[in-house]
Image (cartoon, grey):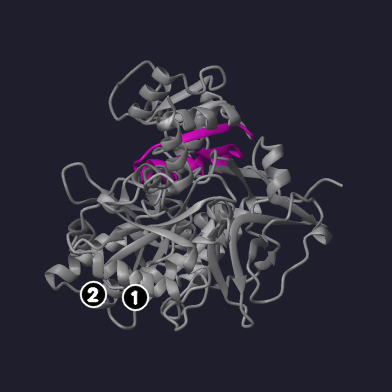
Amino acid sequence: MSPVTAVPELLEAFAEQARNRPTAPVLHRPARRGGHTATTYAELRAQVQLTAPALTTAGVIPGTRVVVMVRDGLEFLTDVYALILLGAVPVLIDPGLPHDAVRGCLEEIAPQAFIGQPKAHAARTVLGWARHTATLCLSTASRPWGPWPRLNDLRRGAHDSPVPAPTRVADDALAFIAFTSGSTGEPKGVQYTYRQLGQQAHHVGDAFGIRAGAPVLSAFLPFTLYLPALGAHTVLPVFDPRRPADTDPRSIIQAIQHFQARALFGSPALLHNLARHCSAHGLRLDGLLDIATFGAPLTPVVLDLLDRCVPAACRIRSVYGATECLPASIADRDDLRGARTDPPAPGTPVGVPVPRLTVRIIAPDLPATGLLADAPALEPGAIGEITVSGPHVSRAYFGQPRANAQAKIKDGQRTVHRTGDLGWLDDKGRLFYCGRKAHAVHTTGGTLYTEQIEAPCNSLPGIARTALVGVGSPGRQRAVLCIELERSGNRHHTADLEQRVRQRLHGLPGGELIEHLLIHPGFPVDIRHNAKIERGKLARWAARALPAPRTARAAATATEDRP
């Protein structure tokens, strides 16, 4: 029997919004000379309907894998929706990845086409990205630049072409590929089906109460894709998605006030910068009703700062998830405040799993298995690996059979995804995050999980955040707690702070295994959110900063004493 086909749900929802509210704003994006440029729903739909035949003329057909590497918000939405209309497969790769990582992504995905801004094409040409596979390369340049055909010229040539009917697709067909940031390994291409895209849109709308016409300031581009289908009025701030922590907070404040934004999406680093600026200048963001942060847990420092500048009715939420499953759970203010228990609960509270998502905890050291029967769930309170299954969970990585074998478990028609994260569920079904499996520190005295140590220490005054790293070989690692001070902290008198940290560690299971405390000027962070700590780099720094172990010193002394 042939699979049932239909117009993609995401595309149909957007088309309905455009039919019902053609003159409503769908997007305001930064203009080159200041201010913002407006686009209505009718204008975006017309642009999509013009781009689709232009791409068809260029050679894009259903199933064509097309890398989209553009920063302009309107171009991004137009190209992605036009590709979905044609049944082609948009491919998103983080532009902030190292060049070698981008090359690896492109070699793995073997795209047939590449849509990019001039800088992306320059890098592709110089660095040899997709040289042998991307036979169709289109430029989004507004003026003639380089040898590549311009998409705008193709659009002008398609003015008299009929608008192609949306390609009917099976729910389980490949719709989209988005690469992970590679923060704990090589980036992997996450496959999204049409059903998964539709389910993610529902989760975004339901979880954050997005209503038609509601102004949403979005500094988190992955969710921007869904907002036109939800009827939202998306406002893009002036920011570099590769460096959200460097965003000028004044531009965020101006956009919130000018557009009367009711919701704000952004990384913890961007929100920390914004809240710190508001606190320093006595500013309040009284119109905000919803703040959602992605990429890393919201620390007590940032939560306290946000509390001072937003109304009490504003919902502050920290979203837990991954490229393979977003969102997985959402922690609200009460959940985040619950991290300050005495004695502190192990890990960081990340809330209750979203509807229709099943979260199970399995043994942390379980080898790869394809059968759910070989991965029994642990009891509430036991720390293990977090697994997720549900309609918006990705079933596979593209072209990665080994990664699929390690991360995917079959349960009949369902796929269970092993996140590589550690955590536990309490008896009320609330999820607590204890860090990445790859970041656990294995000492001779036992194993330490990062969030078990860091979350309680992050709430101490004067500390911006902490990071537990291991120096040495697993099983014989020295546990080191690196400390990043608040900007207002006194870097010349840290003895009192270190004493308070030691007192806090004394009350934590495994706290006595922490051998060293090191003050770091500013943690290295990931390129996507500027919030996930690059622990490999930090561990290498700690190894250089620490004195040599006694055994190494003794061996060196013995060598020096030889005649």
Q: Disc 1 versus disc 2: distance between alpha carbons?
A: 12 Å
Residue 109 shows up from this direction: yes
Q: Mark 1 or 2, which is nearer the eye?
A: 2
The three-letter amino acid code for the residue at tag 2 is Cys
Residue 305: image quadrant is bottom left
In the rendered image, the vertical position of residue 273 relative to residue 370, given as above or below: below
The quarter of the image holding the C terminus is top left
Dot label at residue 289:
1
Q: Earlier in the sequence, mark 1 or mark 2?
A: 1
**In the displayed structure, does residue 6 sit left or right of residue 276?**
right
Q: Residue at x 18, y 51 (%)?
A: 35
Q: Position of residue 168 (x, y in %)?
A: 67, 45
Q: Position of residue 432 (x, y in %)?
A: 55, 71
Q: Residue at x 82, y 55 (%)?
A: 371
* Residue 87 part of the magenta-drawn span: yes
- Residue ID for mark 2: 309
* Residue 315 part of the magenta-drawn span: no
**Could you tell me how many numbered marks the image carries?**
2
106 or 54: which is nearer to us? 106
- What's drawn in magenta, residue-wise? 63-92
CB under 8 Å between callouts 1 and 2?
no
Decide: few, some or many residues near mark 1? Use Cα within 10 Å; few <14, some 14-19, many ≥20. some
